[in-house]
Image (spheres, rainbow, N blue to C red):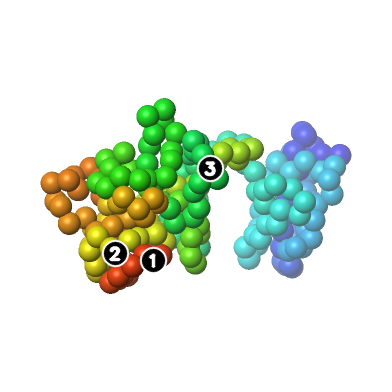
Amino acid sequence: MTRGGRTILIVAADTPIRRAVTLLIEALGAAVVWGRPGEPVADDVEIAAVIAFGGLRSSAMNYPYAGEFFGNVQVNGDIFLPGADCAEQFDFAAVAEVTPGDVVVISEDGLLQLSREAYDRKVAGVISGAGSFRPGIILDRKEPQVDRLPVALMGKVFCKVDAGYGAIGVGDLLTTSHTPGHAMKAADALKSFGAVIGKALAACPAGTGLIPILVALN
């Protein structure tokens, strides 16, 4: 049972002020549950807040999320994300045609599809997840994810390129090409306006390849 319907979970390997903390929280009208790092909490206990001494590690443990919050979240410090890009999920006209690293454009009906034209100003970004890069954050994620894929809108992403239209060097601006799903060097400044995908972070002197780029739609 909890006081006032609230239970506070305190996670700590050990703390000398355990009794004092317990008395303080109970005086505020809440019950206290003490746990150790890595230990699950009973399913019938509804936690209103968590206090962690020495940091908090959360695992999903047969649940879709390691953490779920109802209300605002304030972080007084940095947030470190191991992923490389900021992506957003989009609906695709033919999701089976595209794979991570493909350049995609907006179709006439508002869905995304594989790029097939050079200097296409309808370019939307690059499918996230190719090579060693993974998205750091995914916006507008919905379940189920049928016909939806994450598209890198900013940050680093591996992109398919075709140097058959001109050798690609580090720092070159990239745009869409006639090769489906592949970017090429943006050699024509006038045509490039509104059709730039980003900058090459590695060279591709000839042929086709998969290189890291810095997404910067322009």
Q: Kindly tell me whether residue 194 is visible in this rendering.
A: yes
Q: Circle 2 sits in a helix, a strand or a loop, which is it?
A: helix
Kindly tell me whether residue 23 is visible in this rendering. no
- The residue under the point 29% across, 64% down is 163
Q: Earlier in the sequence, mark 1 or mark 3?
A: 3
Q: Is residue 118 left or right of residue 88?
A: left
Q: Compare residues 27 and 213 and report the one nearer the observer.
A: 213
* Kind of residue at disc 3: Val
Q: In this view of the protein, which residue sits in the foreground, 147 or 156?
A: 147
Dot 1 or dot 2, earlier in sequence: 2
Estimate the spatial distance between the alpha carbons at disc 3 and disc 2, rounded to whole Å: 26 Å
The residue at which mark 1 appears reads as 209
Say which quarter of the image contains residue 35: bottom right
Picture quarter containing residue 108? top left
Alpha-carbon distance for marks 1 and 2? 8 Å
Residue at coordinates 30% horizontally, 70% vertically from top-left? 206
Mark sitting on residue 163: 2
Q: Answer above or below: position of 3 versus 39.
A: above
Spot occupied by residue 141 in the image (x, y as percentages of width and height): 55, 41
Residue type at numbered disc 1: Gly
Image quadrant containing the N terminus: top right
Residue 17 at x, y percent in the picture: 71, 62
- Circle nearer the viewer, 3 or 2: 2
Looking at the rendered structure, the kind of residue marked 2 is Ala
Q: Residues within 10 Å of mark 3 (few under 14, many from 20)?
A: some
| Label 1 close to label 2 by CB (< 8 Å) | yes
Q: Across the whole image, how many numbered discs are drawn on residues?
A: 3
Which residue is most to the left?
Answer: 190
